[in-house]
Amino acid sequence: MSRWRVTNSAPAIRLYMAGAIRSMVQMSPAIRYSKDLGPGDFDKEATIEGWVQEVRALGGIAFVIVRDRYGTVQIAVPKKKVPPELFSAMTSVSRESVVRISGTVKKSDQAKAGLEMVPSSMEVMSAAQSPLPMGVVDKVSVETETRFDQRFMDLRKPETRAVFEVKSVALRLIDEYLVRNGFVEVFTPKIVASGAEGGATLFGIDYFGRKAYLAQSPQLYKQMLMSTGLDRVFEIGPAFRAEPSDTIRHVSEFISFDGEMAHISSMRDVLDVLEGCVQYTVEGVAREASDHVARIGTEVRVPRTPYPVITYSDALDMVVAEGMDLKMGDDLGTEGEKALGKVMADKGYDVYWIVEYPEEAKPFYIMEKDGTPFSYSFDLDYCGQEIASGGQREHRYDRLVERFRKKGLEPEAFRFYTNAFAYGMPPHGGWGLGVERLVQKMLGLPNIRETILFPRDRNRLTGLEQDSITFFVAGEPQPKGSTRSFYVKKVDRVVTTTTNKNTKHWQLRVATEAQHANEARGVSFFSPEKECAYEVEALFLFPRPKSLPRRVRMNTRRPDVDKLARAVLDGLADILIPDDSQVVMLSARKRYIGEGETPGARICVRRVR
RNA sequence: GCCCUGGUAGUGUAGCGGCCUAUCAUGAAGCCCUGUCGAGGCUUCGACUCGGGUUCAAAUCCCGACCAGGGCGCCA
């Protein structure tokens, strides 16, 4: 279908507008997607842009396969019908280069899509280097590690990319369902002063010199909203967990789908909403994203409803009947969950509830089931794996305070939270669901990382800041002094002295800060390898002399910027870099401080490969 | 963090004390070929994670470091 095909009753106006918009954006011909080329384009000109997936040169004719977001287009290049320079350009372009090709669309019985293009011109928008770090269509498999190290290339594979099309559809469906059911989308802070359930699993950050954390859950904030009149809220956003979990279903950063609803009469109200939402989402994906699902090579089974409700006690019995050794109060564990998943699958259920866990195993905000050791809590399991958990919350102030004490927590420390309960809090409940886990189970993917573009786990921290360390050394930067060497006859040695006595102290300061930054990093930056190359960037900020006009920013006086850099490098030796000789790029700048800045040096060291 | 398994060309692998100047595939470079679509044919290129040890001899055995995959704990 042509983008400019006119389908409504006012063709002239539509055409005019399309043309106008086009010319505003760009003058070049419209770039077409592979999926939009069809019989209507036969013997007409078209332009496509994409990655060169393959070049098959057969001598007198060549075929170039160009891939875009939706598929591929075959370009047929008969040697005798195109200019020689075009032929040689098209047969020599490196794989995965981005090209823009204009030509005539031809009907073709031999081509898979039933059509192909005969080119009249090709523009290489971006040539790909060779060899490729991994092949997109090579006839060898690629290991997970290589795939994630070269994620941009990995994502060029349609089956890898399709997961994210599905994830996007799923998120839209979740949104749709909840908004229809009166929920308000909210955003709670991701920088918090303390965690929801203690401090062990939090990532600490420096917040203008104060200790802060990345939020592991919106729990406390969404509950506080229940006291406001925003009585049905949901949030889809990142959550951060510093747990050292090393599994196929854990990452340090994931998308949490949280919901909370007030004025409930029992936990069942919460179950109903979440069940409706999950079912709506899975059904919707099965219906609307079938193309993407097929590309992944899987299928989405729509779960049987209603989701069975199993109490923790019954689940325990069922797992024990399967031969596992568990007693009352024990966590089901991964094995137990899997065993239960198998039992339920045999009964025809992929998704089911496990409710009323022992109160002891649940956090302070969960409501106890009075007169029993249990609580109004639930997990939602999908094929033997937990994807969501939640419960009815303790909304009664006195009981909440009791629960804090029971958990060994000081209620006073949670004043900002408990206050919301002290002045009128309706009964409420909610859930937290791992979006990636839902997508993973829905698509039957082996590893949660498949559902995350750039996964962060215990060992994987990649991206722009990979293998770099940045720190600030306060104080007036000192240069490496000019050295003077002379021979001392008495001791038969060459002695070297420096002209700047402050240098030593400054270098020590640099070394100390480098060490601190390295320790704070968790994983040491230092590597004893002599082959490693480094880039060092330094910005030196000097105090402004009082006499200086305000507009002057550049410090054109001494010390010299290269001598400043020398002093820094010496300070880094053996702390971040084994030897100065390994520094292959050095950038140093100096200027006077601006408003609110402190004199000192901002230093960034990067490992390069 | 613990347990298991592993680290060999750009990619995926074989070899697991001497037959290794290291296998095969893929890839890259070059040549031949007008209908390929896992194209085909010929030629060429390219690797044993690092450090120590055992041995006449180490890719191979042992120890350590680093890295990865899986399992467990914990959780979404």
Image (cartoon, helix red, strand yellow):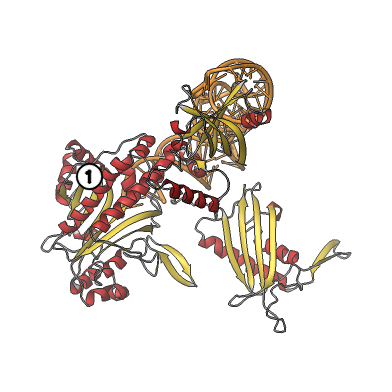
Which residue is farthest right? Answer: A489
Query: Image height check: is B23 above or below A44?
Result: above
The spot of residue A184 in percent (x, y) is 29, 63
Q: Report in which chain the residue with disc 1 lies.
A: A
Give the residue displayed 27% in from the left and 76% down from the top.
Answer: A419
Which residue is farthest bottom? Answer: A547
- Please state which of residues A54 and A191 is positioned toward the viewer in this rendering: A54
Q: Is mark 1 on a helix, strand or loop?
A: strand
- Judged left or right of residue A351, residue A250 is right
Give the residue displayed 31% in from the left and 67% down from the top.
Answer: A221
Q: Determine crowd level at label 1: few under 14, some 14-19, many 20+ residues with C-alpha closer than 10 A.
A: many
Regarding residue A126, the answer to whether it shows in the image is no
The spot of residue A270 in percent (x, y) is 19, 58
Going by the numbered disc 1, the residue's amino acid type is Val
Name the residue that disc number 1 marks.
A351
The spot of residue A595 in percent (x, y) is 60, 77
The spot of residue A50 in percent (x, y) is 53, 39
Give the residue displayed 31% in from the left and 47% down from the top.
Answer: A438
- Please state which of residues A20 and A519 is positioned toward the viewer in this rendering: A20
Query: Image height check: is A490 above or below A145?
Result: below
